[in-house]
Image (tube, helix red, strand yellow):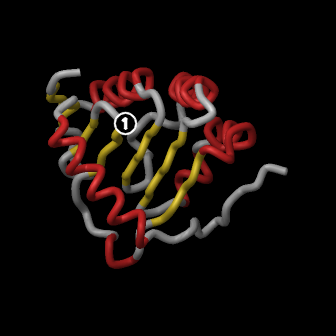
Amino acid sequence: MSANSFDSLVDYQAQIQQLISNAERTLCWFDADLSSSGIDKPELVASIRHFLAASNLARVKILLQEDVWFWRKCTHLNEALGAFGHAVEVRICNEVDKVPGEQFLISEAAAVRRFYPTSMRGEASSSGTVRTLCQQRFDDLWSRAELPSEGRRLFI
């Protein structure tokens, strides 16, 4: 995936779908609440299920600023957590880190970034520099993140 700019919801969701379809081991997702990502659509959840089923080493880390929408509207993904809960972790940003800014989804080979939460402008890139910078930001936020307010679902 070379650098591809986008500025619409449809293009943003298509880039997310492509990144997930090409991911091999890790997905790290930082978003305000995932409401514009398309994660509530069955076809995107099917891609995530396929990604997780393809390898025992596959992992998904989701870091949100707010989790209410995620738990209430992402019923398809929450059902998938029943089968793959051991490979998916959801955390909420620390209060200090809840500021508007870039949102992104990264895999081991590419990144999809939205430059500002109220705009669909962004870029999908396979640049190692972009991916590394996003991963460093994600790791920093993840280390201070908290468990979801709704509680971790065990799906037992």
Question: Looking at this rendering, what residue extends furthest in the bottom direction?
Answer: 96
Q: Quadrant of residue 138?
A: bottom left
Look at the picture and state if 148 lies above or below 85.
Answer: below
Determine which residue is flagged by label 1: 107
Which residue sits at x=37%, y=22%? 18
Look at the picture and state if 141 lies above or below 82.
Answer: below
Which residue sits at x=23%, y=39%? 120
Describe residue 90's horizontal placement relative to residue 110 as left or right.
right
Amino acid beneath label 1? Ser
Look at the picture and state if 89 lies above or below 125.
Answer: below
Describe residue 71's horizontal placement relative to residue 95 as left or right.
right
Which residue sits at x=55%, y=36%? 58
Where is the N terminus found, in terms of image quarters? top left
Which residue sits at x=67%, y=61%? 152
Of 9 and 48, nearer the camera is 48
Where does residue 89 sit, x and y in percent of width and height?
57, 53
Where does residue 6 sit, x and y in percent of width and height?
18, 29
Q: Quadrant of residue 24?
A: top left
Of 132 and 148, nearer the camera is 132
Of 93 and 10, nearer the camera is 93
Which type of secondary structure does the marked residue at label 1 adopt? loop
